[in-house]
Image (spheres, rainbow, N blue to C red):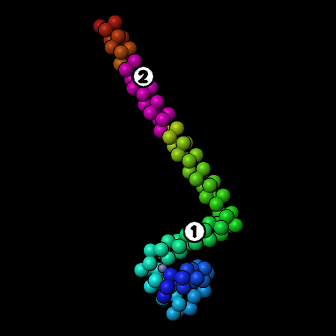
Amino acid sequence: MKCKDAENMIPLFLEDDLDTEDLREFMEHINKCEECKEELTIQFLVLEGLARLEAGNVFDLKSELELRMEEAVHALRVRESMQWFLYALDGLVVVAAVTLAALLITIG
Ligand SMILES: [Zn+2]
């Protein structure tokens, strides 16, 4: 099979429209020929991208990403406030210890 033949078959392959013999030869060529493999990849991405655009999946992907980013920001905030809380707790323990020591010294 020549590159020209393989290129002509790419749209048929993507639409699952090749008979067994053609498909076998096509796959053999694609596996050997980098140029045709690249051409197949490009045409697949274009076709898949258009299909997703028509189905509105691109927007779903975008909001999915936004949701994940919001969750990450929220998790980060929780972690940061937890850290602040722990620092505050540390401070309180020190203050309590000092107060207790002062109290004991005063009493003693
Ligand atoms: Zn080729």
| Principal secondary structure, stretch drawn in magenta | helix
The x and y percentages for residue 14 are: 58, 79
Work out whether residue 100 or residue 61 is closer to the camera in this orientation and state it: 61
Left/right placement of residue 83 relative to residue 5 reads left
Q: Can residue 34 be seen here?
A: yes
The answer as to whether callout 1 falls within 8 Å of ligand 1 is no
- Rendered position, 31 above or below 24: above
Q: Residue at x 57, y 83 (%)?
A: 9
As helix, strand or loop, the secondary structure at mark 1 comes to helix
- Rendered position, 45 above or below 28: above
- Rendered position, 80 above or below 9: above
Quadrant of the image containing the C terminus: top left
Amino acid carrying mark 2 in the image: Leu
Q: Residues within 10 Å of mark 2 (few under 14, many from 20)?
A: few
Whether 98 is among the magenta residues is no
Provide the residue designation for mark 2: 92
Start and end of the magenta stretch? Answer: 79-96
